[in-house]
Image (cartoon, helix red, strand yellow):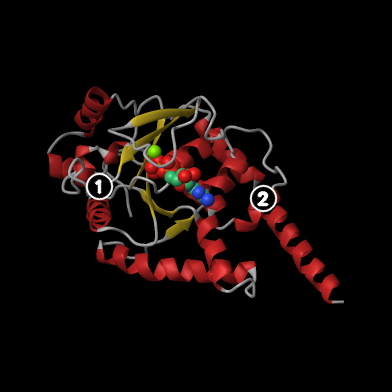
Amino acid sequence: MAVAAVGEVLFSVVIAGLAVVAENPELLRQVAKLFLSPPWQDVIIPESVVRETRKSPEELRDEARRSLNLNTRDFWNIVVCGQAGVGKSTMINAFLGVEDDDPRAAKSGVGETTKARTVYQICEYLLMHDIPGAGTEREPADGYVLRHKLYAYDVVLCLTGDRLTEGEILVARQLAKFQVPVLFVRTKTDIGVKSIEKRHRGRMTLEKAKDEFRKEVNASILPQLMGAGYLTPRIFFVSAWWIQDFSILGKDNFISGDTLFRYQMDEIVFFEQIMLLAQGRRMQTEEQGYGM
Ligand SMILES: Nc1nc2c(ncn2[C@@H]2O[C@H](COP(=O)(O)OP(=O)(O)O)[C@@H](O)[C@H]2O)c(=O)[nH]1
Ligand SMILES: [Mg+2]
């Protein structure tokens, strides 16, 4: 009886996992479709940046084009920032849908730190940019957002661990001040959930372990983000391994049958939010700016 019950539980977890993915191929297709087409207009520069720099949106985009070779007109641009080791390269490889040892892959692992900025072409019209996190001597947090012209990208992904560092808080504050669209992402959630399961020596269900993990991380980061100026902050819980397996852009099929989907948390809404933010950056007029 006990065995049957365990079997039933496992089976329903498997079905629930597949259902989540199966209900979402349409969303994932929409995301892929967006980035397989060129943007219909240039990126909107937030009004607060225009005010602060006293430069026109056109000037600011030209500047980004000249100094960073950032082509905002013909490409969608997602920038990934965070401390060394947080998982930036792995996240980019996940979007590419390639394994770390693929020749196209971003170099990942200990000691493989990105010096200034590296650009990867994910698909026809989507570029991902890997930049070093703030808070080191080479990368002071002061002025980070304007220095890296983060306002000229469609979406900023701030990858983080369990807590934001002082540097990350300063950057979050600048992003809020300049109303730059950003998603705060807790990466490597598969490891986080596994360690909670381990702490409870297997006596906790997977869903409970996910809840507890989410609660713990939220409890430490959300107050930090509120302090940085976000009224209703959110953290996206994401595993790059999961994204790699269900990569929307690099592969045709969404279901690989791997057991990793057990560790799925916010990956689908994460894709959805990236899509919505990117669309928003190309839909408003410059005067309206970008509302947070
Ligand atoms: N389990 C797990 N490991 C990850 C994940 N993302 C990154 N890693 C590992 O974390 C280490 C650092 O990742 P990397 O992408 O090089 O970090 P970067 O310095 O920010 O580019 C590597 O050993 C990765 O394999 C994840 O989502 N899950
Ligand atoms: Mg890297």
Q: Residues within 10 Å of mark 1 (few under 14, many from 20)?
A: many
Measuring from the top left, give residue 214's x and y in whole percent: 49, 66
Q: CA distance from mark 2 to mark 1?
A: 35 Å
- Judging by the rendered image, the residue that carries numbered circle 2 is 21
Left or right: residue 127 compared with residue 176: right
Q: Amino acid at mark 1?
A: Ala
The picture places residue 66, in percent across and down from the top left corner, at 23, 22
Q: Residue at x 23, y 44 (%)?
A: 145
Between 156 and 103, the one lying in front of the other is 103
Residue 87 drawn above or below residue 161? above
Marking on residue 259? none
The tag on residue 134 is: 1
Relative to 57, say whether 48 is above or below. below
Could you tell me if residue 108 is visible in this image? yes
**Residue 257 screen position, x and y as percent:** 72, 46
In this rendering, would 289 be left or right of 251? left
Look at the image and tell me whether residue 283 can be seen. Answer: no
Q: Residue furthest left?
A: 54
Q: Residues within 10 Å of mark 2 (few under 14, many from 20)?
A: some
**Between tags 2 and 1, which lies in front?**
1
Between 153 and 199, the one nearer to me in the picture: 199
